[in-house]
Amino acid sequence: MKPATLLAGIVSLAEASILHHREADVQLFPANGAQDVNPDTHLVLTFSLAPTVGKAGNITVTDVSDQKVVDTLDLSIPFSPSPYGNGSTKANYTDETVYQTNIIGGMNFYFFPIIVRDNVATIYLHNNRLEYNKTYSVTIGSSVLSVNGEGFDSFSSDSSWTFSTKSQGPAAGSTEVVVAGDGSADFNTVQGAIDWAPINSNSKTTIHVKNGNYEELVFFQYKTNLIIRGEDRIKTKVGYPNNSAFNPPNRQGPSRRPAFSFRGVSDIQLSNFAIENYYRGQAEALLTDGLRVVVDNMWLNGSGDALTTYGTIYIKGTTLYGDGDTVLGYASAFWENSSIITTAGPLSWTRTNQGIHGNVLLNCTLIGLQGNSTFARLPDNTGGVLDNWPYAEMVLLNANTEGVAPEGWGPVQGWPWDSSHVHFWEYNTRTLEGESVDYAKRLNISRQLTSPPDEAIIKQYSDPSFVLGGWSPVVY
């Protein structure tokens, strides 16, 4: 062996020894040298001590075959105008600052390139940058993460972390795929599976989501005949820290503040998992905008406007938590055997347009945790546009309630305006113990239905197809 070759070998062994030593206190996912990795994977580092995210340095992913850089995360770029979600909720269109931006479902969102939970640092690459049948190397600048005050430099410019993706994705024509955060199934992320699902499909596609905590922003558009089904409505959780301060409004386009949202869809079903928004403020867990949407056996936890609805939606066996105006309802929505719980303030702000029905709740539970909530409000919000939603409709049939103020409804403000078309109706409202509530102090704009005089109305509003414009929902 030539001396130069021998020396190179010794140097190579020394570098490998140093790399192994540096890796001793960190566990990698995907593992260094891993095969058959899903292209939607996050990069996860688990330390023996909690790491700290730096304010500079790059994370770079390179295609080994041609040394082309396929993704770069620059930690010197600020995450958001309000990275902690506690700043202004108004859009500042004069702000020319570049923020960390990811294209999710075809729309741009500000996002965290790294999130640390306890001893685990999860690196979020930009969506759809990795491909099947590729080998990638990852380098991490020494200022990106620190542990116990020291920069983490195991994968700096002179060394890398490598893995190879699967040769191909799900077979053409597949109608069912599985998501598992540990990489053992078709996809690692919910968004990755949704991106794969066909647009405007005539046949049903089902995404099964295994138990786990999927911390990711989810948004999609123009999907049809799609079912997203979790393994357990508590143990399968999709969540993200987001609100109207972290992701202020765009000049155009839909709201960017929910943890999970979609628009322009039809025949979508969400079943048996939890969605949580980890920030407070105007922060939906879920925003639905579509026709014939089913929300079945879900656990939703947001803040203000915790659930915002447009279109037509059927909600069954679902629990919703929020912080006031817990339902921001533009949709025709039929609720059955579900619960709405608010920490304070009204349970809903129902914004029904003329010609459609609003929120109708059959055999549901409504709870105000501070003891003085109301079912729905109509604040002074005219703006010369709709005269304070004069066709607002919320109908309660056989509701169980607790923590609701004696007036039941309101405040209703902005007088004078014609409120004759407002349907704030209730029938057979009871306490959680099953006792009839006292209607004596109910707001005069509301109406208490009785049987038999109002039997025809009660029968109509007990039928989902009447409320939902002729659609008779089916839960698959």
Image (spheres, rainbow, N blue to C red):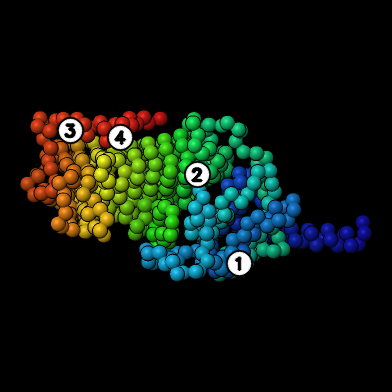
Classify residue 387 by image quadrant: bottom left
CA gap, disc 1 and disc 3 = 63 Å
Numbered badge on residue 173 = none
Q: Position of residue 154 (x, y in %)?
A: 65, 61
| Tag 2 secondary structure | helix
| Tag 1 secondary structure | loop
| Tag 4 secondary structure | loop
Q: Residue at point 19% right, 36% down?
A: 398
Q: Residue at point 61% right, 33% down?
A: 171
Q: Circle 1 sits on which residue?
A: 57
Numbered badge on residue 458 = 3
- Observer-side mark, 4 or 1, equals 4
Q: Circle 2 sits on which residue?
A: 190
Tag 3 or tag 1, which sits nearer the N-term?
1
Q: Residue at point 72% right, 52% down?
A: 64
Amino acid type, mark 2? Val
Numbered badge on residue 469 = 4
Q: Are marks 2 and 4 in contact (CB under 8 Å)?
A: no
Tag 1 or tag 2, which sits nearer the N-term?
1
Classify residue 343 by image quadrant: bottom left
Q: Position of residue 226 (x, y in %)?
A: 46, 36
Q: Is residue 11 above or below residue 407?
A: below
Looking at this rendering, what residue extends furthest in the front direction?
A: 384
CA gap, disc 3 and disc 2 = 40 Å
